[in-house]
Image: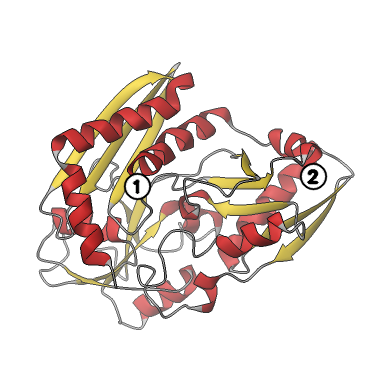
Amino acid sequence: MRIRIGTRGSKLALAQTTLVIEALGAAHPGLDVELCIIQTEGDRRRRASLLAIGGQGVFTRELEVVLLDGEIDVAVHSLKDLPSTLPEGLVLAATPPREDPRDVLVTQDGTTLDELPEGTVVGTGSLRRRTQLLRLRPDLQMKDIRGNVDTRLAKLDMGEYDAIVLAAAGLSRLGALGRVKAEVLAREAMLPAPAQGILGLECRADDTPTREALATLNHAPTFVSATAERAVLSHFGIGCRLPVAALAETEGDTLRLRARVLSADGRIAYDAETRGPWTDAERLGEAATRQLIEAGALALLESLEVAAEP
């Protein structure tokens, strides 16, 4: 059997896809795997703000197009980049075990968030991270940043930023987490993006052999966590243009989901929490969304969406 796996060409995307290829090889000895590098809009427009070029989906759309066209058989995504509603004909076939979902604050000297001087310039391209940082430290100066992990670390070293915020999972998969001076931010303070730290393996719905091969890589606790977190986005009907955070964690047979929505300046934050059996993952996401709406989040999101329009 031959499987063509598509991915972005960044160092992180290639590292993540290599992990998938190695896992497939171990599960299916003799499997013929071809790596296909696809350039996405987010890769081509590296200087533009993610919000300006469409937010969630800019790193995944081209992969889905070639997947639907039959040019590749599997697309490997950072699942937080993949919109919660998939194109007709495609399915999320598997999620390997999740990496650390938390964010990290990286500085040149190891200064922690609490220790940062007033007015410190912090680089992040994420509205979710920006608003939660302002919630904790309204005296900080937020500055947009783009580029891959190495580029962002280089900008920090050159003094363009005093600190930057990155995903712990990306640094870990690159083997860089132990080489940088980073503070891992607590979940309660910096709730992650839905599906952060999770790889999503997408394929065509009617490609039964590929779906069966990918199923051997699926990690059930990760899949149900992703389902609940992505359900928060899908029931709001939004992507990463707005500051929405969610994290689901398994506790025995129970799934605990926390979700948060914030105002652009971080001064207003609505939180929700739901619990239930794994089989209710989708319903838990819907219930958390209802809690947020009842608290007043819908009006906040609508006002933010209008403000974000070009």
Residue 77 shown left or right of residue 285 in the figure? right
Q: Looking at the image, which residue is at 62% across and 42% down?
A: 91
Q: Looking at the image, which residue is at 50% across and 44% down?
A: 99
Q: Nearer the viewer, mark 1 or mark 2?
A: 1
In which quadrant will I find the N terminus? top right
Give the image quarter of residue 307: bottom left
Mark 1 and mark 2: Cα distance apart in space: 31 Å
Q: Where residue 176 sits in the image (x, y, percent)?
A: 49, 61
Q: Where residue 126 sits in the image (x, y, percent)?
A: 33, 62
- The amino acid type found where label 1 is placed reads Pro
- The amino acid type found where label 2 is placed reads Gly
Query: Which residue occupies the foreground of this view, 5 or 181?
Result: 5
Look at mark 1 in the image and give the residue it sits on. 192
Q: Where residue 120 sits in the image (x, y, percent)?
A: 17, 72
Residue 220 shown left or right of residue 4 in the figure? left
> Badge 2, how many Cα within 10 Å: few under 14, some, many 20+?
some
In which quadrant will I find the C terminus? bottom left
Above/below status of 268 relative to 255: below
Residue 163 numbered mark, or none: none
Secondary structure category for the residue under label 2: helix
Above/below status of 10 relative to 67: below
Residue 109 shown left or right of residue 3 in the figure? left
Q: Where residue 189 sits in the image (x, y, percent)?
A: 22, 46
Secondary structure category for the residue under label 1: loop
- The reply to whether dot 1 and dot 2 touch (C-beta < 8 Å) is no
Look at the image and tell me whether residue 113 can be seen: no
Look at mark 2 in the image and give the residue it sits on. 25
Query: Which colour scheme appears in the figure?
Result: secondary structure
